[in-house]
Image (tube, rainbow, N blue to C red):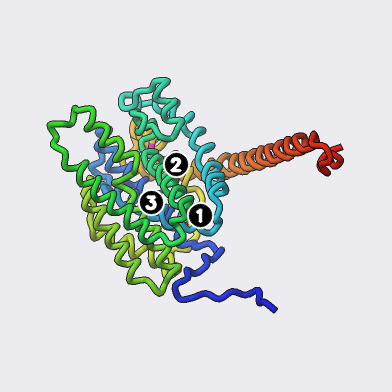
Amino acid sequence: MESNSTTTTATDPIVPKSSRIFELDSLRAIAAINLMLFHFTWVYSEKYGFNSDILFQYPYGKYGTQLFFMLSGLVNAMTLMRKQSASYYVQSRFIRILPPFLLVLGLNLLLVQLMPLRDHVQLSAATVAANATLLPSLLGYECIEPVTWTLQVELQFYVVLLLLFTLGALKRPFWPIMCCMAFCFTYGMFANRIDESLVGASWYQGIQWLKDALIVEYFPLFAMGMLIHQGYLERKRWVKYGCGIAVAAAVYHAIELRHGSPFATVLLIGLLVACQYGKLPILRAKPLLFISGISYSLYLLHNNLGTVMIYYLHQAGLSPLACFVLASILVIAISALAAHIIERPLGRMVQRVWQFAAVWLHTRQQMGWLRQHSSVPGNPAKESFR
């Protein structure tokens, strides 16, 4: 009699657990808070000339973005491998991202008419339409909400991840990722070293566009997260995956243009590894988990909305520090309301519509099959159809 149990070898990856890793959720909150601090202090001061002599400056926003991409690589690889379904993955990402984004895009069409945004964002029908695709930069337009350039990169990563999944490369992802690193390094170094005197040439623009379309500069960050997760699954091969993470980090710093600190990258890698293994229970604090739960709404809303708030609070005579504190509290409160009243109910509604459409299409296909076969003489389907 055959046994229902299966045995695994030392080389087989561990089946991912279904339990949620709350420390990873908290990292999403930390990345969101990092960006809010960056945009409300350093960016506002530099972009709009805000008098912030008594307000601290926080110029480290790029590390929040770096953490966000690394975390996304880890979490999305984990999600896709756990579900083992590309269609489910596409459905969940669509429901999660698109409806709230389109609503916030509508809000931003109003916000950018207010000072101090009026002189910094040029609206046109083409700009709005390009932003609605979530890929405005690839179409040659600016993001109406500047922070959403990271969402564009995130969507491009989803396409790459789905391609790897479809090709079966995520079953043993180490060498496929290393091949991607070789391509990113080669193409990134080539694109970065082109003589500046050729910037106006059309072929130069094509090279840079392809670099952006293939997320050459940012894919190493996603790769680090993917390798951290796979190293967790194949713990007996931690040396191999550790070397892979080091290669991805080296490629990133060789081709990235923001001059980030390798030391910061090492710290972020250590933070992700510790969270993956559940070694930082302090990050399970309820305030962080609360921010994590509203992080997408906070990400979409905080920049333009907070900028307008700071401007008008400052015009009302409040000090820079008071403007920062009050705007932060209001943006978090509004984001929480948006998450609970709009984002989540809207997601559930879209999910029901999606499921209804899937059932309807499946039923139509079945009815078409029955009609087709009912016309065949002697076919049992003819009698069952009647």
Task: Check residue 71 for magenta coloring.
Answer: no
Residue matched to label 1: 80
Q: How far apart in space, not on screen, are marks 1 and 2 (Cα)?
A: 32 Å
Q: Residue furthest bottom?
A: 1
Is there a contact, CB below 8 Å, between mark 1 and mark 3? Answer: no
Q: Residue sitting at 26 percent across and 53 percent down?
A: 252
Q: How far apart in space, not on screen, are marks 2 and 3 (Cα)?
A: 20 Å
In the picture, measured across the screen, residue 219 lies left or right of residue 375, that is left
The amino acid at mark 2 is Val
Q: Residue furthest top?
A: 125
Residue matched to label 2: 331
Q: Residue sitting at 20 percent across and 44 percent down?
A: 190
Q: Which mark is residue 68?
A: 3
| Residue 188 image offset from top left, x and y in percent | 24, 46
In the image, the segment drawn in magenta is 298-303
Quadrant in the rendering for residue 140? top left
The amino acid at mark 1 is Leu
| Residue 98 image offset from top left, x and y in percent | 51, 38
Q: Residues within 10 Å of mark 2 (few under 14, many from 20)?
A: many
Q: Residues within 10 Å of mark 1 (few under 14, many from 20)?
A: some
Query: Which badge, 1 or 2, is on the more N-terminal residue?
Result: 1
Q: Main secondary structure of the magenta part?
A: helix
Q: Residue sitting at 42 percent across and 72 percent down?
A: 235
